[in-house]
Amino acid sequence: MKEIKNSLSYNPQYPAITDLQIKAKKRIPKFAFEYLEGGCNDDVNLKRNITDLQEVVLMPQYLKKYTGHDMSVNLFGHKYDAPFGISPIGLQGLIWPNSPEILAKAALQHNIPYILSTVSTSSIERIAELSEGRAWFQLYHPTKNELRDDIIKRAAAAQCPVLVVLVDVPSFGFRPRDIRNGLAMPPRMTVKNILQVMTKPQWGIETLIAGIPGFATLKPYMPGNLDMSGLGQFMNQTFTGRIDMEKIKPIREMWKGSLVLKGVVSEEDTRMAISLGIDGIIVSNHGGRQIDAGESSIKPLKNLAEKFGNQIKIMVDSGLRSGPDVARCLASGADFTFMGRPFMYGVGALGKKGGDHTISILKVQLQQVMEQLCCEKIDDFPNHLIH
């Protein structure tokens, strides 16, 4: 069995994701940290993601012979070293400068997937270079087919192995924090935000070095010299619109690699995905950022895995904060898991070392759970599910 390498190391001052969260909050301006932290409306589903996941209980075995653990996973033709990856996050470089590059490098080093968002602050080409063509790409579906096709061709040229189509943004989430902080569309930099930056000197210095964050992948399509109002108008015109089966069909025809839909939570949508020849779904509620009245992501996971797990790869994100959370999702039927906020806490807290640190912590935590359960490989987790 494959063991965690002794070279795995982490800063013992921050042994838990909550430690990184506390440190990151001290280093990131309030408006940027609240953009990362916030859900929508009253944060009900944001909290539900965590509390519902923590109710999943696993059964340990102590007397059974145990020969060691193997946490590797074969997914879409690649063998990953761990059953978790890094979720796409918009405006990553606003939260911490150069964070997409930091996380893409760490993901390559640890052989886990990193997903770049269309609205992140590094380009497809840059992340493909840093990840040696291993990074996945998440597509916000544009309103114009010409733009959609060009972005997909760029992802293919960059040799992205997996295209993830986001389906849960028929409208932008109503996020009171972002509205108050000027991060809605159009964004605006208020006097209050400027004062917040002045209290976080390291963030300010790193941002000056890295440059003002922008939508790097979209830059070729944006008119020059946009002011804040113009940027808001461009984003609303470019990405407002609902995805349906007819919009997914041409993407399936164009994309020769693995195709995943992110944001699927219902049986009906899963059946449609299978009928379209989609390779996988990510059960997700966008980290609680889109609909406050919906279910947590763990709730529909077990049902979808039981009914469709032999027909399509079923992955999950939203609410995961630890190795035990990864174990809970795998035991509930997930083939793979993703997390967003924990990795951003890591980078916000520790800068360039944050990605490596966070991945290492999660691997060590997951190993400890596997040893307690007497679980030798990832496929065994469902055998330990109590409820």
Image (spheres, rainbow, N blue to C red):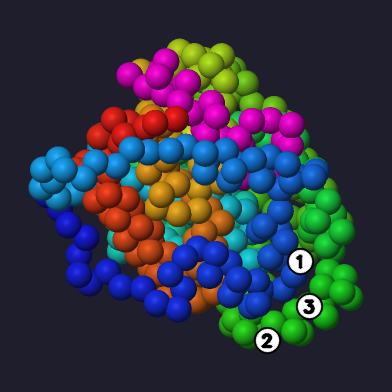
- The residue pinned by badge 2 equals 201
Secondary structure at numbered mark 2: helix
Q: Are marks 2 and 1 in contact (CB under 8 Å)?
A: no
Q: Is residue 288 magenta?
A: yes
> Which one is nearer the viewer's eye here, 335 or 88?
335
Q: Disc 3 residue type? A: Gln
Q: Residue at x 83, y 62 (%)?
A: 181
- The residue pinned by badge 3 equals 196
Q: Against 41, is 346 above or below?
A: below
Q: Residue at x 74, y 37 (%)?
A: 292
- The residue pinned by badge 1 equals 31
State which region is magenta: 283-310
Residue 172 place in picture, x, y as percent: 75, 41
Q: Residue at x 41, y 46 (%)?
A: 326
- Does label 3 or label 1 sit earlier along the sequence? 1
Residue 276 place in picture, x, y as percent: 46, 17
Q: Is residue 302 magenta?
A: yes
